[in-house]
Amino acid sequence: MSVEVGEQAPDFELKDQHGSPVRLSSFQGTKNVVLVFYPLAFSGVCTGELCALRDDFPEISREDVELLTVSVDSTFVLRTWADRDNFGFSLLSDFWPHGEVAKLYGVFDEDKGVATRGTFIIDKAGVVRWNVVNPIPQARDIAEYKKVLADLS
């Protein structure tokens, strides 16, 4: 079961594609966070979704919004993917302990060993204000993210 709307978002710290630690709670009080879990780097649907976030989601350039994406890939894989596809946002590695943060959010597929497509929008107080969890093959609609962030502004 995923973290529900109205609940405090579980805090975590993961390394990004550059090996730098990123802690969710560091954004409290200053930024709304769009937390996007996806199965694997370089896969077709995942690449499409992250390219859509890069190209069609100008909210990531707002001072009050932080986009954090999470997969079970290693930081080395994420760095190669970010460099290849010019992702300027944080790609966080939930590699070890394997899928720990995805499990914390209730979006880890134990049979496949990867995260499902879960998205959580977390307000500046650290509370989940919106979420969606899609099956692995089904892409998400970023238009919904835009609506929720507009309501939080």
Image (tube, rainbow, N blue to C red):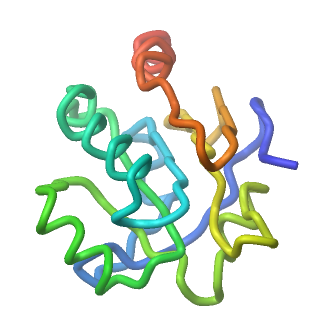
Vertical relation: 24 (above or below) 13: above
Q: Taking 75 as reference, is 61 above or below it?
A: above
Nearer to me, 48 or 144 = 48
Q: Quadrant of residue 137?
A: top right
Question: Where residue 122 sits in the image (x, y, percent)?
Answer: 56, 38
The C terminus: image quadrant = top left
Tell me: 2 left or right of 21: right
The residue positioned farthest toward the right in the image shown: 1
The residue at 65%/54% (across/down) is 116
Side (left or right) of 37 relative to 59: right
In this image, 92 relative to 3: left or right? Answer: left
Residue 74 in picture, x, y percent from top left: 41, 84
Q: Which of 29 and 79 is in front in this view?
A: 79
**Picture quadrant of residue 81:** bottom left
In the image, residue 93 sits, relative to residue 131, either above or below, namely below
| x and y, in percent, of residue 30 in the image | 37, 40
